[in-house]
Amino acid sequence: MKRKSMTMAACLALMSASPAFAATPELESYCFAQAEQVRPALRQPEKEAFIAGCIADHTPGPPAKPGGKY
């Protein structure tokens, strides 16, 4: 497994372990359907990256810290 794939898998594992950032099954289904419609067809690593990006785009981020600074 390539380093990038391992990093993505670790990020997805952390996201699924944290209920605050977990994607709903409906969102996962939506993103999977969107990945299936991409032409030319995506290979498996590309499809996983597409789905992860889709979920990230449709999931709210963590709340901002008080004071507006990170």
Image (tube, grey):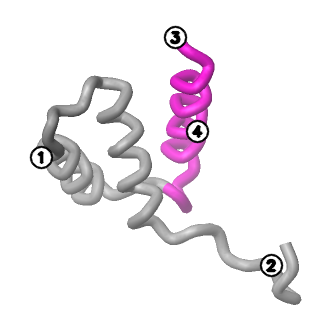
Kindly check if marks 3 and 2 are in contact, taking CB atoms under 8 A apart as contact: no
Q: Earlier in the sequence, mark 2 or mark 4?
A: 4
**In this figure, which residue is indicated by the disc labeled 1?**
37
Number of marks: 4
Q: Earlier in the sequence, mark 2 or mark 1?
A: 1
Q: Earlier in the sequence, mark 3 or mark 2?
A: 3
**In this figure, which residue is indicated by the disc labeled 2?**
65
Residue at the (41%, 38%) spot, across then down: 49
The alpha-carbon separation of the residues under discs 3 and 2 comes to 36 Å
Amino acid marked by disc 2? Lys
Which contiguous range is marked in magenta? 1-21
Residue neighbourhood size for the residue with mark 4, other residues' Cα within 10 Å, grouped as few (<14), some (14–19), many (≥20): few
Q: Residue furthest top?
A: 1
Helix, strand or loop for disc 3: loop
Kindly check if marks 2 and 4 are in contact, taking CB atoms under 8 A apart as contact: no
Kindly check if marks 4 and 3 are in contact, taking CB atoms under 8 A apart as contact: no
Name the one closer to the observer, 3 or 25: 3
Give x and y (percent) for residue 54. Answer: 36, 55
